[in-house]
Image (cartoon, coloured by chain):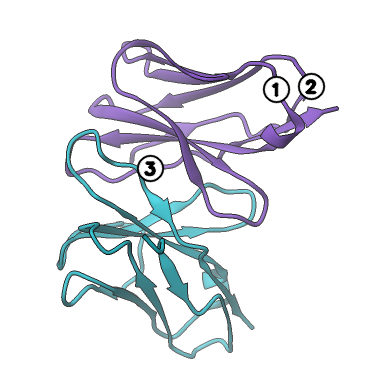
Amino acid sequence: QKEVEQNSGPLSVPEGAIASLNCTYSDRGSQSFFWYRQYSGKSPELIMSIYSNGDKEDGRFTAQLNKASQYVSLLIRDSQPSDSATYLCAPKGGSQGNLIFGKGTKLSVKP
Amino acid sequence: DTGVSQDPRHKITKRGQNVTFRCDPISEHNRLYWYRQTLGQGPEFLTYFQNEAQLEKSRLLSDRFSAERPKGSFSTLEIQRTEQGDSAMYLCASSAGGARNEKLFFGSGTQLSVL
């Protein structure tokens, strides 16, 4: 059984701070990694994807991947109240595999 | 691009009844996924199609669940003999597929309540 572990939170950070979200996964065959954001009552939307070890930056978001440790993280710099949402980690195994989502980490950014 | 459309938005049914949901993916997307989500949990994978072929089905999925995508366009998900534990948000998503092209676009979901 493929598993994805995330701290459920809530993770509370003050506005302007860095929010750090972590994820571990069990499937060593996972090749692609995705972070989705889900606002309350809404559907998930993709915010970051990462395929290679190291860091990938996109605006205020940085995804970090360490395949040897089976670990992926998401950093949100200069956190804003509008970043308050649940962040879902989703590894994908191979070109024919499906996405397996973690339970998500609920982030709350306080003004 | 009109996005992924799901119908109905809400469904209330009595235990033991059958229900069917419909999903219309983004027109050029060849992959279609069904997920189920309950409060406080991430989306749980149910099944996915590439064109009309059902490529994978969750081993956790009861035989009461069946999905079709007869012409590789829209898909239906049927739940027979519904149980209270089936109450959840059923999410459909589509993607263009292919290596490094797995961005899923989700529909708004169908909220099922089994009384």
Q: Is residue B113 left or right of residue A31?
A: right
Residue depicted at 28% across the width and 46% down the height: A98
10 Å neighbourhood of mark 2: few (<14), some, or many (≥20)?
some
Q: From the top left corner, tell me how far across and down residue A95 is, in percent.
A: 17, 39
Residue hosting label 2: A15
Q: Which is nearer the N-term, disc 1 or disc 2?
A: 2
The tint chain B carries is: cyan
Q: Is residue B56 visible?
A: no
Residue hosting label 3: A100
Q: Chain of mark 1?
A: A
Give the position of the C terminus of chain A as an image quadrant.
Answer: top right
The purple one among the chains is: A
How far apart marks 3 and 1 lie (CA) works out to: 27 Å
Q: Is residue B22 left or right of residue B48?
A: right
Answer with the quarter of the image where residue A94 lies: top left
Q: Is residue A22 above or below residue B21?
A: above
| Amino acid of disc 3 | Ile
Residue hosting label 1: A79
Instruction: Give the camera-side residue of B17 and A95.
Output: A95
Instruction: Answer whether labels 1 and 2 touch (C-beta < 8 Å).
Output: yes
Secondary-structure class at tag 3: loop
Secondary-structure class at tag 2: loop
